[in-house]
Image (tube, coloured by chain):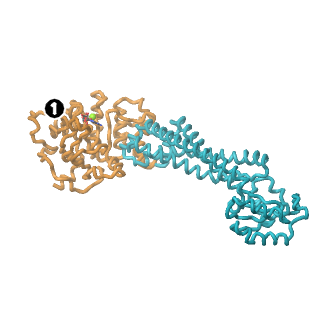
């Protein structure tokens, strides 16, 4: 058991999130573990709770009940002045890129290092390296409006990983891109995952999911209805209500309501 | 690095919000000028009170070489006359009305005069022998001034008996009233300044919400996110306070120093140097008002 706790980079224990008392919960008693170094898709229709899941990992919102562990640490127990440290260990990319329009590619990526006090020389060395990883060599001085959507998303990914976070959360990163460009972005995310970063990607792009053959966690109305390793966007197994046993990445059955994380509380670093 | 970053953020914030920043500067300038004006009026009152005002109520001036009063026709006061007056002050008939009295010699009078009129051109043309010696009396009941006046006016060696308070009290009450008005206007203006700073910071935070959102996501600390906004308000307010201090200095230097002291040479005015005492107070007041109102605004309008 302790071994599993240590392996889990993200762990949800009976997590429920209610935004509005009158509506159904956005997430309803979620139990889920994502291991260090894993690549997991979070799929499901719009409104199924994918973004809410990612927001809880970031401590952007508080779980109504249950516990969220990131690198063995219960995020509810992280005091507000230490939340920045949690977020330094997590990179995030969005559908809408969120670049700073008046800064060029280099400056957009460097911004993430400047604001946490990295020295000029470290920035000068690291940024070109990361831009190379995402395939933007030689485009340091372009402005965001001079880039295609795919290139803009690569800048956003570079910014998200430039501080070497242990986790990369991607909320529909290909939502605004055509299929070919999307596959290019997936290549970048896969490469980052190969380098040891845990990647969780929310999407409803079935082609991508089918192509990648990674773990798929399917949400519906805030409930996990499927959790399959090396899976497709739509299940091959017929779903019978919610009584079906869920499987984790290694194919083992995941018991409901596991023990709280008692493992070492580590930094979110890869 | 982080400092350079914060400074450049402040610079871009000030540029982007220029018209709002200018209005913050002007409003704090006007409000702190009124605060400072109230302070200057109080300083001026103190200046005019001179050495004796708060200590005694009645002065008995003795005849000197330059006295022209008929009672001084026989020349300056003699030591015998002076001792007689001293004895009279200590006699039971007079002592029952007074708490105590002090003798001010000509040299002491000259010293006090120099202190009070240090800012006036008149100080250079006065010598000790032009100033009379005097007895300064602290009354048990200031209303009993008439008794002292009647007893001493006719004594040999006495030039005149003056109730100093009566001369200045009405003027001081006018000046105190003006101070209160200035403080009242300052209060209203300070409320304006606080609201305007809050609005400016809110707009600034709104126009830079994309940057701050990214800063939050990549784990920038609360200080790095908030400090540029707070300093933006504080810098604007401090500039306003500096302008207010400069204005007060200019009023003392040119209006009081050059114009008023020529119009009223027998009145002691504060010097422009004295108004600089107000400057640090105004700077701190302006800066802290801006800092506190920015901080409270950010707590509501900037997620960190
Ligand atoms: N800030 C919010 N306030 C109220 N309801 C919200 C908020 N964010 C999301 N919801 C609701 O929670 C549910 C899940 O939303 P979300 O997590 O954004 O789903 P997805 O990302 O899968 O489209 C939806 O019903 C949505 O309306
Ligand atoms: Mg969403």
Along the line of sight, which residue is nearer the eye, A257 or B173? B173
- Disc 1 Cβ-to-ligand 1 distance below 8 Å: no
Residue assigned mark 1: A234
**Quadrant, the N terminus of chain A:** bottom left
Q: On the rendering, which quadrant does ligand 1 occupy?
A: top left
Image chain in cyan: B
Image chain in orange: A
Residue drawn at x 16%, y 44% as measured from the top left? A249
Against B111, residue A80 (above or below) is above
Against B118, residue B184 (above or below) is above
Q: Can residue B224 be seen in this view?
A: yes
Q: Can residue A35 be seen in this view?
A: no
Against A91, residue B52 (above or below) is below
Give the chain of mark 1.
A
Along the line of sight, which residue is nearer the eye, B47 or B173? B173
Q: Where residue B48 sits in the image (x, y, percent)?
A: 71, 54
Residue lying furthest right in this view? B74
Determine which quarter of the picture holds residue A251: top left
Residue drawn at x 53%, y 41% as measured from the top left? B193
Residue lying furthest top in this view? A178
């Amino acid at each position: 058991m302790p071994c599993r706790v240590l392996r889990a980079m993200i762990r949800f224990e009976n997590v429920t999130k209610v935004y509005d008392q009158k509506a159904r919960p956005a997430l309803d008693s979620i139990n889920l573990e994502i291991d260090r170094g894993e690549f997991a898709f979070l799929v499901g229709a719009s409104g199924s709770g994918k973004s809410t899941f990612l927001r809880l990992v970031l401590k952007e919102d508080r779980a109504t009940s249950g516990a969220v562990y990131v690198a063995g640490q219960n995020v509810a127990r992280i005091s507000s002045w230490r939340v920045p440290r949690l977020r330094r260990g997590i990179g995030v990319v969005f559908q809408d890129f969120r670049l700073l329009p008046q800064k060029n590619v280099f400056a957009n990526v460097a911004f993430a290092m400047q604001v946490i006090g990295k020295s000029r020389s470290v920035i000068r060395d690291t940024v070109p390296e990361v831009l190379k990883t995402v395939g933007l060599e030689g485009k340091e001085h372009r402005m965001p409006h001079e880039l295609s959507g795919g290139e803009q998303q690569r800048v956003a990914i570079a910014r998200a990983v430039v501080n070497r976070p242990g986790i990369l959360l991607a909320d529909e990163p290909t939502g605004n891109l055509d299929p070919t460009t999307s596959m290019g972005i997936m290549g970048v995310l896969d490469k980052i995952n190969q380098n040891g970063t845990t990647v969780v990607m929310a999407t409803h792009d079935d082609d991508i999911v089918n192509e990648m053959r990674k773990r798929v966690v399917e949400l519906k109305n805030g409930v996990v209805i499927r959790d399959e390793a090396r899976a497709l966007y739509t299940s091959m197994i017929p779903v019978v209500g919610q009584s079906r046993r869920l499987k984790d990445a290694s194919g083992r059955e995941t018991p409901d309501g596991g023990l709280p994380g008692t493992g070492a509380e580590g930094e979110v670093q890869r | 690095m982080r400092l350079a970053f914060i400074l450049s953020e402040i610079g871009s914030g000030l540029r982007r919000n220029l018209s709002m920043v200018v209005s913050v500067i002007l409003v704090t300038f006007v409000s702190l000028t009124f605060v400072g004006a109230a302070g200057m009026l109080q300083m001026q009152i103190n200046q005019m009170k001179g050495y004796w005002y708060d200590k005694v109520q009645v002065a008995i001036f003795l005849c000197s070489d330059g006295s022209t009063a008929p009672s001084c026709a026989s020349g300056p006061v003699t030591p015998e006359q002076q001792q007689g007056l001293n004895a009279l002050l200590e006699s039971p008939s007079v002592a029952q009305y007074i708490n105590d009295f002090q003798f001010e010699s000509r040299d002491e009078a000259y010293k006090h005069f120099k202190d009070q009129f240090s800012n006036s051109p008149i100080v250079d043309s006065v010598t000790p022998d032009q100033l009379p010696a005097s007895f300064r009396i602290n009354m048990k009941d200031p209303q009993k001034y008439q008794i002292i006046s009647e007893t001493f006016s006719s004594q040999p060696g006495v030039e005149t008996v003056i109730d100093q308070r009566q001369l200045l009290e009405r003027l001081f009450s006018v000046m105190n009233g003006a101070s209160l008005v200035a403080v009242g206007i300052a209060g209203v203006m300070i409320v304006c300044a606080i609201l305007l700073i809050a609005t400016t910071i809110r707009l600034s935070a709104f126009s830079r919400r994309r940057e701050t959102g990214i800063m939050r996501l990549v784990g920038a600390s609360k200080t790095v996110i908030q400090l540029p906004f707070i300093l933006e308000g504080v810098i604007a307010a401090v500039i306003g306070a500096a302008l207010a201090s400069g204005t007060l200095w200019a009023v003392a230097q040119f209006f009081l120093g050059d114009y008023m002291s020529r119009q009223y040479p027998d009145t002691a005015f504060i010097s422009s140097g004295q108004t600089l005492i107000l400057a640090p107070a105004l700077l701190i007041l302006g800066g802290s008002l801006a800092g506190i109102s920015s901080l409270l605004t950010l707590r509501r309008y900037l997620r960190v």
